[in-house]
Image: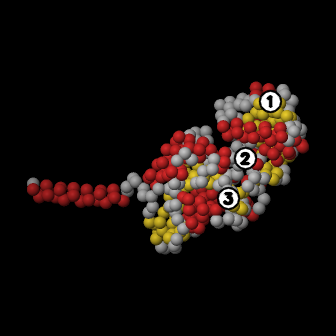
Amino acid sequence: MVSKRKSFLVLAFVFLFLVSIMAAGCGSTKPAATTTQGTSGGPAKVVNVGWSGPLSGGAAIYGQDTVEGLKMAVDEINGQGGITVSGQKYTINLITLDDQYMPNMTATNARRLRSENKVPVIFTPHAGGVYALQEFNLEEKFLIIAHSADPQIAERGNKLTFVAAPPFSGQPEPFSKVAMEKYGKKVALVPATHKYAKDWTTTFVSVWEKLGGQVTGNFAVDYNKETDFYTYVSKALATKPDVLFVGGPSKPTAMIIKQARQLGFKGGFILMDQARLEEMEKVVPLSDLTGCIGMMPLHKMPGPGVSKFVEDFKSKYNGKLPTFHHAGNYMAMKIVARGMEKAGTVDDAAKIFEGMKQIFPIKEVGFPYELTGINSNGSLQVEEAGVMVVDGKYGPPIPISVKK
């Protein structure tokens, strides 16, 4: 009896010992930095980089697009051995948290990323999230990478904010000139109702009227709630416009254009940049988008850098065509990595940002665009182009100039 009891106790001790070993190797708390095996065979540390954006809800596809661009850059960097900072090898670990496009959740995620993962850099792809982070990023000393075309982000003067997307303020003037020359000077507005759309509309109206145009009416509509835009489009067309100004998410924007054509409208359309022609093509044929003036699809942009990026992206993501959302975040991650190398630190956000400013110009095939620098307000200098759909085909690029 005693022998059996001793055998049981020995087995129990061995079991508990093995469990304790397994638990030590499977802890739930991930350290901010760890040591891994580098591709060259030497030890490499890990630097965490954070992202907060929509991975659920109505903007989930947009959020996923930005993450895909970041992951492509991270995979390339790590696949080439990572980065070398002051003689130390690092691989990059991208940590993504869903904020459902809600600024208060962006702030919560950022505090979690800072406290648990010690990230020096946090990416976010929406203006509301950027505004929320700008309330405390200087105090907590982390760099915001903002993928948003809202010009007010750079105008706020936050010294630790890098705006990785050019502002939309450069688009209304060239788009308006092309529309006026082709169709006429009377425009009716059928924009979306969220803040970004309101800011875009205000800027557009100011430019249109400055160029001698007339606004015949504003028939704003919630693109996220309405599914039939007949009433709004009918009221807008009753004012006899030459051009319709539209824009919000791509799918409802395409439906508005389709209904306008069904109602006999023969004029042109100016699109705010949230609506992307390559996405609208999935809803209506390109022939139905004739007369639309908007952003040139990325895969139509000239240059060897764009061509290589498109092919590499399609290869990685099963033939999917990339948009500027993918390319912009891909470039931003590469810029951050090179900035760390230049600055000699993976911890000091201010020095990393200064290092980023020193790596330009970038004119290599590995980047979709030629990049000339970072403006004094913290925004990226990148050349974009618009386009008008003519007879069911994309026309030549429309140059867009943004004040430096």
Q: Which residue type does callout 3 highlight?
A: Ile
Q: Earlier in the sequence, mark 3 or mark 2?
A: 2
Q: CA distance from mark 3 to mark 2?
A: 17 Å
Tell me the mark number nearer the camera, choosing from 3 and 1.
Answer: 3
The N terminus: image quadrant:
bottom left
Q: Which residue type does callout 1 highlight?
A: Gly
Residue 127 or 325: which is nearer the viewer? Answer: 127
103 relative to 284 in the view: left or right:
left
Q: Residue at x 57, y 61 (%)?
A: 352
Q: Is residue 262 above or below residue 169?
A: above
115 relative to 96 in the view: left or right:
left
Q: Residue at x 75, y 52 (%)?
A: 402
Q: Earlier in the sequence, mark 3 or mark 1?
A: 1
The C terminus: image quadrant:
bottom right
Q: Is residue 280 visible?
A: no
Residue 71 x %, y % = 58, 57
Q: Secondary structure at mark 1?
A: strand
Q: Secondary structure at mark 3?
A: strand
The quarter holding residue 73 reads bottom right
Q: Is residue 160 visible?
A: yes
Q: Residue at x 54, y 51 (%)?
A: 138
Residue marked by disc 2: 168
Residue 374 tag number: 3
Residue marked by disc 1: 217
Q: Secondary structure at mark 2?
A: helix
